[in-house]
Amino acid sequence: MNTPVYSTFETEFRVRPDDIDMFHHVHNSKYFDYVLAARYDQMERCYGMAMEKFLERGFGWVVRTAHVDYKRALTMSDYFIVKTGIESIDEKGCRVKFSIRNKATGKLCCDGWFDYVMIDIETGRSAKVPEDVIEQYMI
């Protein structure tokens, strides 16, 4: 059986002063923020299904599990590229793989994956991912 291959997309950001920790590099928690911000951008720009569309339907995405493998630090004012893509998706949720590369050097700063589940906003409980959403995200 062939495993589906999904599109990947890129978003560029720049390290801000408030991203820097006492060791003069980006704090590890900021990498989570970078991936979430890239997904927010890519949901609208690349998939044509902004987060607001999910909210209008009474749904939201939440992170169930996150794995980050740190390789090298980003520092003040670095430009970097967050590349993300669906690794798998079904009615229970999706796994999004990601990498973050320093734009100037091309070197990998970190990579990993996030497992997202869909929730019903009204109840706060998990919900089945609608078939049209699965199809939209299978590009």
Image (tube, helix red, strand yellow):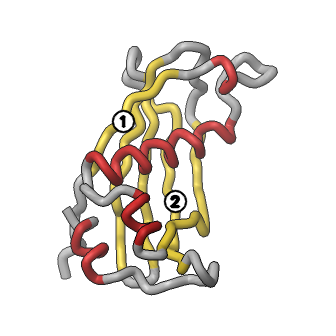
Q: Residue at x 49, y 43 (%)?
A: 37
Residue 123 position within the rendered picture, expressed as x and y whole percent measured from the top left? 62, 84
Q: Residue furthest front?
A: 56
Relative depth, front residue between 12 and 108: 12
- Is the N terminus in the top left, top right, bottom left or bottom right quadrant? bottom left
Side of 126 where 38 appears, left or right: left
Quadrant in the rendering for residue 102: top left
Relative depth, front residue between 113 and 16: 16
* Residue on which disc 2 sits: 114
Residue 9 position within the rendered picture, expressed as x and y whole percent measured from the top left? 29, 45
Q: Residue at x 32, y 39 (%)?
A: 10
SS label for mark 2: strand
Relative depth, front residue between 126 and 120: 120
| Amino acid at circle 2 | Phe
* Residue on which disc 1 sits: 11
Quadrant in the rendering for residue 121: bottom right
Dot 1: few (<14), some (14–19), or many (≥20) neighbours within 10 Å?
some
Quadrant in the rendering for residue 7: bottom left
Residue 100, compared with residue 111, is above or below; it is above
SS label for mark 1: strand
Q: Residue at x 39, y 84 (%)?
A: 91
